[in-house]
């Protein structure tokens, strides 16, 4: 093969290749129907199925606004408007109903041996102060909280919208600010009465005998009986849970997202309803349910016979020593 | 009566934020409050989409349902409005809202959020239409003047549509048929329990 001939064949071959390349290129470019511009596009339904909410990137400082869709709000609405109301109504009205039935059947638990006339210190002034501070806060917190759940269907029809708003706004501020003394009270109660509230074997016997509520045999108890220990732990654990969930709500979106806020509100609501129901029982037994019980937290002193019937072991072990001590210190007057 | 709705055609939104600016200016919305915002999903990746989102004026609105003081009302046009005189700033509407629409003037510690503010569909509030009291609390009432929300009117790509639900759904359907694709009417299923399929 001569050199010019070889050159010619290379040029022809190159031209042929170029023609193939050039002619095939427009074919691909002329088919826009084969290109789907939304092939990789985000899909709303797919995103919602994967993540339950749709988030992106925004251009304003408010990062909450980057969530553009959270259908979970609908579920939260159902909880708040339907489920929580049922829980609250059943728990609170249920306990009230049971207490009324119990009162009608059993009546007030009397001091069976009558009053001795002799009294003994049960709760000192500091203990009573902490109790009543917590209790007062609790009642206001409970009423202002119930207003958020039940105010619209129960109270609003009875007053003008403006009056209801004024009351609700004050209730909201009371709820937020009284949470501080309430939480302090729960903490103080925890430390103040922890010594007498560790569950022990005596409590099993106490619960087995129904706490002496039914029938007329009072099981022995130390300073706090099984029922009081139950109330103590409801206040300490329930109070802590309600404080934590409440402060999450009071400082919205501090390290929390929309889902955490919804969960905190749900926990706060359910615990609050059960807490209120439990406290109704506590209020009942501390007032009309039992003769001689209120004065323990009222004046701080109780009748010796009441102590014998309800806290026999406490009277024997602790109170004797303490009352002897008091008698030697006449300057300190119990009940103030 | 028309049933007013918003529809954001995400395949057209170019994230120019003109709707956000128009809204803020038209209603003199205070600093820190955004009644409308544009959010980009999968930003910087293939197939990213931007969606302009505000109150969708839901059917059976969750905010209205959870409000403990009944501050909300739905107009005959299906627009969800609220009274700032009744609102106590509890923040519950924000938890219930699927679209993050409610806004509060303050951060909200100790329950001090202030009166809630949100998109009014350019329809003001309970005060007399076009009154100064209405403007100060809720901004302009364009609907009473026979005008549609300014965000949609301003939209340069006609991505954001406002108007009667059936009409804007029809416009969107025709677009999808003509161009052959559509990423859907964002939020419609959550807000109105319906989807637009062509």
Image (cartoon, coloured by chain):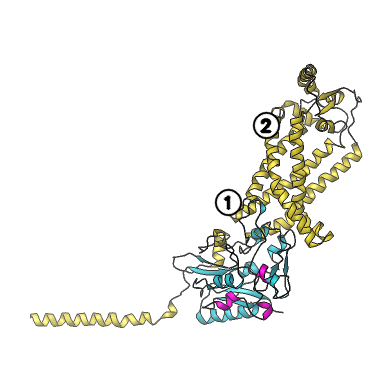
Chain colours: A yellow, B cyan
In the rendered structure, the answer to whether residue A54 lies left or right of residue A5 reads: right
Quarter of the C terminus of chain B within the rendering: bottom right
Query: Which of A159/A336 is in front?
Result: A336
Quarter of the N terminus of chain B within the rendering: bottom right
Report the magenta residues as a range: B135-158
* Alpha carbon separation for disc pair 2 and 1: 29 Å
The picture places residue B22, in percent across and down from the top left corner, at 56, 73
Disc 2 crowd rating (10 Å Cα; few below 14, some 14-19, many 20+) is: few
Query: Which of B36/A53 is in front?
Result: B36
Residue at 61 percent of width and 73 percent of height = B6
The picture places residue B24, in percent across and down from the top left corner, at 58, 69
Q: Identify whether B41 is placed above or below A179.
A: below
The picture places residue A90, in percent across and down from the top left corner, at 79, 49
Q: Residue furthest left?
A: A2
Q: Is residue B197 visible?
A: no
**In the drawing, what numbered circle is on residue A276?**
none
Q: Chain of mark 2?
A: A
* Label 1: which secondary element: loop
Q: Chain of mark 1?
A: A
Q: Answer whether residue B148 is magenta in the image.
A: yes
Q: Identify whether A21 is placed above or below B46.
A: below
Which of the 4 quarters of the picture holds residue B186? bottom right
The answer to whether mark 2 and mark 1 are in CB contact below 8 A is no
Q: Identify whether A3 is placed above or below A119.
A: below
Q: Where is mark 2, residue-wise? A: A191
Residue at 70 percent of width and 74 percent of height = B131
Which of the 4 quarters of the picture holds residue A311? top right
Q: Identify whether A245 is placed above or below A302.
A: below
Q: Where is mark 1, residue-wise? A: A254
């Amino acid at each position: 093969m001569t050199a010019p001939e070889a050159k010619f064949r290379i040029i022809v071959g190159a031209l042929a290749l170029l023609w193939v390349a050039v002619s095939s290129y427009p074919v691909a470019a002329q088919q826009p129907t084969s290109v789907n511009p939304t092939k990789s596009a985000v899909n709303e339904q797919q995103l919602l199925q994967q993540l339950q909410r749709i988030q992106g990137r925004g251009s304003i400082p408010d990062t909450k606004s980057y969530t553009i869709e959270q259908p979970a709000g609908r579920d939260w609405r159902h909880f708040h408007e339907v489920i929580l109301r049922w829980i609250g109504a059943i728990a609170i009205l249920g306990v009230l109903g049971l207490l009324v039935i119990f009162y009608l059947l059993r009546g007030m638990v009397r001091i069976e041996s009558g009053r001795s006339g002799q009294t003994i210190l049960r709760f000192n002034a500091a203990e009573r102060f902490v109790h009543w501070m917590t209790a007062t806060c609790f009642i206001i917190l409970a009423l202002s909280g119930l207003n958020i759940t039940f105010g619209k269907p129960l109270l609003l029809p009875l007053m003008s919208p403006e009056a209801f708003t004024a009351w609700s706004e004050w209730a909201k501020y009371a709820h937020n600010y009284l949470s501080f003394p309430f939480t302090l009270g729960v903490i103080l109660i925890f430390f103040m009465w922890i010594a007498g509230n560790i569950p022990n074997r005596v409590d099993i016997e106490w619960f087995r005998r129904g706490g002496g509520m039914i029938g007329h045999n009072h099981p022995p108890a130390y300073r706090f009986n099984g029922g009081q220990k139950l109330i103590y732990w409801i206040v300490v654990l329930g109070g802590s849970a309600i404080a934590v969930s409440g402060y999450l709500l009071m400082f919205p979106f501090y390290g929390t997202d929309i889902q955490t806020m919804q969960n905190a509100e749900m926990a706060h609501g359910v615990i609050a309803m059960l807490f209120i129901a439990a406290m109704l029982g506590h209020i009942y037994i501390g007032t009309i349910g039992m003769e001689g019980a209120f004065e323990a937290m009222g004046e701080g002193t109780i009748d010796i016979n009441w102590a014998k019937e309800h806290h026999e072991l406490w009277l024997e072990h602790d109170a004797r020593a303490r009352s002897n001590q008091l008698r030697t210190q006449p300057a300190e007057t119990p009940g103030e | 009566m028309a049933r007013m709705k918003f529809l954001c055609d995400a395949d057209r939104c170019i994230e120019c934020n003109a709707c956000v600016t128009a809204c803020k200016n038209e209603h003199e919305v205070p600093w820190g409050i955004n009644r409308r915002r544009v959010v980009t999903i999968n930003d910087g990746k293939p197939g990213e989409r931007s969606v302009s989102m505000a109150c969708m004026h839901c059917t059976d609105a969750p905010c209205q349902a959870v409000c403990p003081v009944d501050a909300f009302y739905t107009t005959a046009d299906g627009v969800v409005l609220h009274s700032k005189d009744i609102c106590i700033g509890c923040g519950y509407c924000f938890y219930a809202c699927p679209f993050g629409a409610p806004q509060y003037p303050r951060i909200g510690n100790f329950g001090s959020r202030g009166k809630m503010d949100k998109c009014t569909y350019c329809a003001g509030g309970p005060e007399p239409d076009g009154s100064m009291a209405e403007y100060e609390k809720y901004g302009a009432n364009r609907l009473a003047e026979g005008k549609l929300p300014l965000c949609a009117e301003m939209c340069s790509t006609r991505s954001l549509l406002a108007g009667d639900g059936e009409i804007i759904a029809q416009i969107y359907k025709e677009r999808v048929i003509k161009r052959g694709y559509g990423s859907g009417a964002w939020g419609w299923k959550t807000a109105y329990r319906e989807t637009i399929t062509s």
